[in-house]
Amino acid sequence: MENLIIASTKRTPEVEFNIDGRFKISGRSIPEDASQFYDRLYEWVFHFCQESHISITFDIILEYFNSGSSKAILDILRALVGSTKVGKQININWYYEEGDDDILERGEYFESILNVKFNFIETD
């Protein structure tokens, strides 16, 4: 298994999924077809969870994402949280800009759905 690194575009976020357990999605996520972009990420995470037993730190640093991206990100988080049932530890860091209540509230919503603790980190 190799790292999954994807450069950002005007419509898609930067992705850094490293086999050492450091995951990051950052930027804007407004792809025309969220499935087309996120399916590859989901498959990588699914296989990583099957093959590796190391802990994961997932940094989510999105300034904006649309509803299609929201569903896809939630699916990825569900796969990660599901892996905690077999002993994998996961640490989710949700970054939001000071005063950006929309992004903060989306993170809080994900946290409540997944029933897992997020670390909310306010940035300037």
Image: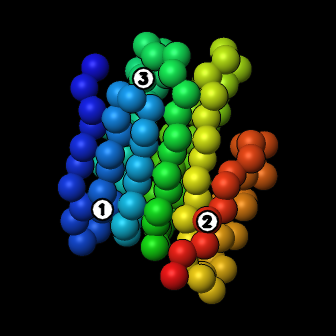
> Which callout, 3 or 1, points at the residue further toward the start of the chain?
1
Judge by depth and name the residue closer to the eye, 97 or 65. 97
Q: Look at the numbered discs 2 and 3 and tell me whether their residues touch, using CB distance below 8 Å.
A: no
Within 10 angstroms of label 2, few (less than 14), some, or many (20 or more) residues? some
Position above or below: 41 against 24? above
Query: Residue 29 at x, y = what percent?
Result: 38, 64
Please tell me which residue is depicted at 72% across the width and 60% down the height of the picture: 109
Query: Would you say residue 123 is visible in this rendering?
Result: yes
Residue 33 occupies quadrant: bottom left
The residue that disc 2 covers is: 121
Please tell me which residue is depicted at 46% across the width and 73% down the height of the picture: 64
The alpha-carbon separation of the residues under discs 2 and 3 comes to 26 Å
> Which callout, 1 or 2, points at the residue further toward the start of the chain?
1
> Which callout, 2 or 3, points at the residue further toward the start of the chain?
3
Residue 22 occupies quadrant: top left
Please tell me which residue is depicted at 66% across the width and 62% down the height of the picture: 120
Q: Look at the numbered discs 1 and 2 and tell me whether their residues touch, using CB distance below 8 Å.
A: no
Three-letter amino acid code at the position of disc 3: Phe
Disc number placed over residue 12 in the picture, else none: 1
Three-letter amino acid code at the position of disc 2: Ile
Disc number placed over residue 48 in the picture, else none: 3
Query: Residue 78 at x, y = what percent?
Result: 61, 37
Judge by depth and name the residue closer to the eye, 57 or 6. 57
Residue 11 occupies quadrant: bottom left
The colour style of the image is: rainbow
Query: Would you say residue 35 is visible in this rendering?
Result: no
